[in-house]
Amino acid sequence: MTDELELICFQIISSSGMAKTCYIEALRAAKKGNEELTRLKVEEASNFFVQGHKIHAELIQKEAAGQSLDFSLILMHAEDQMASVETVKLLSEELIELYLKKSNEAGQKDF
């Protein structure tokens, strides 16, 4: 594995890890009924997620252009981290919606 490919893999891993962390933070904020923080964390997560996808797309473009990429456990780990963020994103979005709906309903009953 070249140093360049290793750096790219670690960028994907880092972006994915940050996205996952932000989605979990958004979920926790929604559980507490904090809509503003939830939105901020989802936006932050989305930015990290897009960043990771852009870096990944560059790898795909290189391979499509005929540049051979060495298979490695680091590359496989980067791909795995991106896939896990997809799952966390989808589940977080659903749970956030439920938590915020529950929080809004509880707030309306108090009036």
Image (cartoon, rainbow, N blue to C red):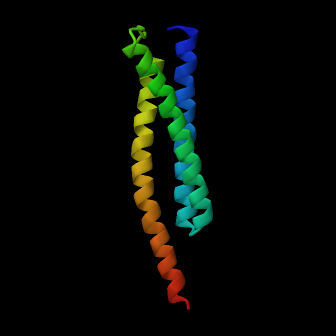
Q: How many labels does the image show?
A: 0
Q: Which quarter of the figure has residue 7?
A: top right
Relative to 69, is 79 above or below? below
| Residue at 56% from the left image edge and 43% from the top image edge | 47
Relative to 23, is 54 above or below? above
Q: Quadrant of the C terminus?
A: bottom right
Is residue 61 toward the left or the right of residue 111 in the image? left
Q: Which quarter of the figure has residue 38?
A: bottom right
Image location (x, y in percent) of residue 68: 41, 8
Image location (x, y in percent) of residue 63: 40, 14
Image location (x, y in percent) of residue 34: 60, 67
Relative to 84, is 110 above or below? below
- Residue at the bottom extreme of this rendering: 111
Image location (x, y in percent) of residue 3: 58, 10
| Residue at 45% from the left image edge and 41% from the top image edge | 85
| Residue at 41% from the left image edge and 42% from the top image edge | 86
Q: Which quarter of the figure has residue 37?
A: bottom right
Q: Report the front residue among 79 and 60.
A: 60
